Amino acid sequence: MSIRRKLATLLMVMGTSATLVAAEPAGSWPQWRGPDRTGISSETGLLKDWSAKAPTLVWSVEGMGDGYASVSIADGMIYTTGNFADGQGVTCTSAETGKVVWTSKITSEPPKHSYEGSRCTPTIDGPHLYCVASSGAIVCLKRDGGEVVWKRDFKSEFGGKMMSGWGYSESPLVDGDWVLCTPGGKEAMVVALHKLTGDTVWQAAVPAIEGKGKDGAGYSSIIISNAAGVKQYVQLTGRGLVGIEAATGKFLWSYNDVANDVANIPTPIASGDYIFSSTGYQTGSALLKLVKEGTEIKAEEQYFLNADVLQNHHGGMILKDGHIYCGHRHNNGFPICVEMSTGKVVWGGETRGVGKGSAAVTLADGNLIFRYESGEVALIECTTEGYKLKGSFTPEYVSKKPCWAHPVVAGKRLYLREQDKLMCYDIKE
């Protein structure tokens, strides 16, 4: 076995992110699923058990607008998106006090689609924010005051299309001088734009993919992979996974079997030469190995787990020490641990847990935070030794709509977005 292959195997087993990033300052959560889009917080010194002492509410504030978006945090400011009477907008809130600092509209009226409301977690990069309106547009704003710098429309400029009618849900990726997003167009499935001007760098055409799913963008967000020695952007689209060469926008590979005909949602996981993906609607999960053959990249299926074994509807997956932790079953969040390299279920998958519906999952200081669709929040030890519940609580406010916004941990605080409200809990040890 070559040194490169040995290293790739080690990376997969250890659960190392494909792209190494500098550690974020304490109190930061700059984008969707955290600093490197893994759903893992670097915070330590947190409450290890909620059974005896549940997190304490620090503040609760209204004014976020309606929606299911999570939050991003930097320099003591919190950003999210929401629907207001006069349009979809971005809100900036003080992390210390919960006071709304500014709100800036990015659409002239609330977008119309099923499950009305925002989806996008803004991406923070220097003095700017980047977000995707659920109607289909990418917008750059100034963090100081919320002024719109530039905007590009998915449908009119890129022939954008969604696989189904629930609104664009992507959180854009900033990579160096570029910002990446997924209009879902035939000639522009993924586009790279200059982050300061919005000018097109390249647009990636994806050839017709036969089989499961539907044409257009899915509900996932782009990740970076360096598999097979090629930097590439990996996205879960309406027809399944695709890989796009980062430097040129060239289509590299696709994988259809993990697609479904309704909504492909969870952000995939990259680790070394491997990509792990899962979708709900009775679909399942797959591990791929990306292999370079000449100038081409091939996606080789290592295994496929049917829906009864593992399907993550939405709420995301965590890779830790070679194991996948997430909620299993369609429209359910049954805690489960699966060995990534083999697909073997280590524990779980049959226990409902403290809440109902799908569960959004974040990892912080050795524990998984499960936020159930029904509102309950549970602390579960991140271990291969079995399901270990370490307490739970019901937040101050639970709306009648599904609790889908992902929990965020930053500055030893837990942030829970709930439609128009944002709640901040102290989780210091």
Image (cartoon, helix red, strand yellow):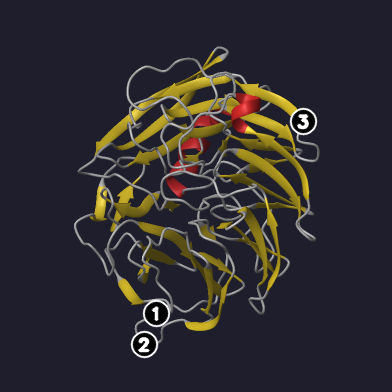
Would you name the residue on which mark 1 appears? 49
Residue sitting nearer the eye, 346 or 138: 138
Q: Is residue 1 visible from the viewing direction of this image? A: no
Image: 336 above or below 415: above
Image: 84 above or below 340: below
Q: Position of residue 44 (x, y in %)?
A: 55, 72
Q: CA distance from mark 1 to mark 3?
A: 49 Å
Would you name the residue on which mark 3 appears? 199
Image: 390 above or below 343: below
* Amino acid at pointer 2: Ala
Q: Pointer 1 and pointer 3: residues touching (CB < 8 Å)?
A: no
Residue with the most extreme bottom position: 52
Would you name the residue on which mark 2 appears? 52
> Mark 3 packing: few (<14 Cα in 10 Å), some, or many (20+)?
some
> Mark 2 packing: few (<14 Cα in 10 Å), some, or many (20+)?
few
Q: Position of residue 113 (x, y in %)?
A: 45, 43
Q: Pointer 2 and pointer 1: residues touching (CB < 8 Å)?
A: yes
Residue at disc 3, secondary structure: loop
Quadrant assignment, res 375: bottom left
Residue at disc 2, secondary structure: loop
